[in-house]
Image (cartoon, grey):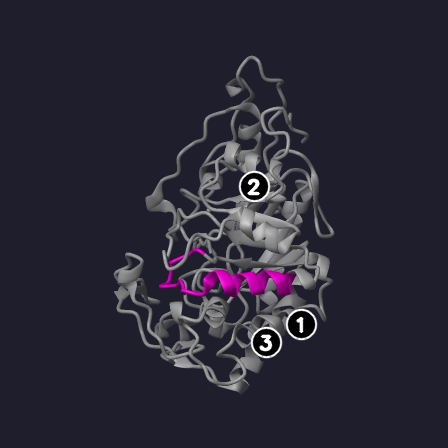
Amino acid sequence: MELPTNKAPHLLAPGTVGAIDVRNRVFAAPLTRGRAGPTRVPNDDLVQHYADRAVHSGLIFTEATTVSESANGWTNSAGLYTREQMEGWKRVNDAVHANGGRIVYQMWHMGRAAHSSFLGGEQIVAPSAITINGANFGSDGVHAADGSKKPYEEPRALTIDEIAAIVEDYRRSATLAKEAGFDGIEVHSANGYLLDTFLQSSTNKRTDAYGGPVENRMRLLNEILDAILTVWDADRVGVRLSPNGVYNDMGSEDNIETFTYALQQLRARDLAFVHVMDGLGFGFHKKTDAFTLEAMQAVYQGTLIGNCGYTRDTAEAAIAAGNATAISFGRPFIANPDLPFRFAHDIPLAESDPSKWFGGDSDGYNTYDFAEVAEIPEEQPTASVIKAEAVSGSSVSGSSTISTN
């Protein structure tokens, strides 16, 4: 449905992200919600959830989705490494496309942020044997597979052969993603998960080809991109970065230099986009000055998607200034599946219930309503409200730490 654009003419305008056409620049950020169940296969609740947000959004990023069984570490999060999971995501994608939406798969390996209970008791992995210090970002421990809180565990350093196997996991998952009908994929290299810990100097103390200078620390991300690009065209592939984030005990004194190099390298690949958590609302490490969206765009000079803490008006300003092509919104989309519609018509945003952010059933996941036409202020042009119809045929009345991944 076409929305009036006068309230945010840049944010609500159509455009392109690589080869992906988008109806507006209000994107749904990746949010870990833990609703896929123990098989990690997308179910009816996920079909409905994503279908709802496809009615008005320009683009949807999936929740962080693991690329292999050994990449897991979050209760009931979704995966994409089996045929069953691929078929589940195909149902989601079909529902999104039926509502005119676009959807990108976010590829995830939890690395040292996991707990061994998710891995059959096997030790968690990282570039180096450095344990997360929860005190640095206000965390009292990690969730184990049984839901209990445990102390963070010491990871072991991956071997060269294991790194090669992880690269293959990404390629295999990217192949399944194409079969599932995604519009694109995003490599999650942010928020203290595996690829971020390889990139940052504070968590990578290796002395081999994957450690030391930034060129080596970026080697794993580059090898994963090389593998993915044998399956996908570059104009449908993006990367997620978080140069300012402290979540999962991240942040390095050379982050400006590290992420400047990373942005330059990614720009040379002519990818569809780079998706950055430039906002500080998810925690700032304070080891450098903040790497602003404007400064990142000066380096990247391409399609940047900003994220974290934006309002309609600050998002409009960022795009109007040429610092971003689009902005992704996380938590606002939880209780407002029709967020662009509300932005377009000055309708107040609903508030979500934080106690229902993670896990559970459809309550707090698919129980938030679409705004009604009667809520549009009188001076606004009216537009009919479309409600999604899930592939299963169930009627949908609507429904990103919460981990923004």
Image point (44%, 52%), residue name: 290
Quadrant of residue 133 within the rendered picture: bottom left
- Above or below residue 319? Residue 133 is below
Magenta part of the chain: 244-266
Q: Which residue is mark 2?
A: 53
Q: Position of residue 70 (x, y in %)?
A: 47, 74
Give the x, y percent position of residue 207: 47, 84
Q: Which SS class for mark 2?
A: helix
Residue 214 appears in the picture as rendered? yes
Which is more toward the observer, 297 or 342?
Answer: 297
> For the residue carrying disc 3, how many other residues have a C-alpha within 10 Å: few (<14), some (14-19), or many (20+)?
many
Side of 238 where 40 appears, left or right? left
Q: Residue at x 28, y 59 (%)?
A: 139
- Residue to which mark 1 is pinned: 226
Q: Quick one: SS at disc 3?
A: helix
Q: Which residue is at 64% across, 27% downward?
A: 5
| Rendered residue at 46%/68% (across/down) | 200
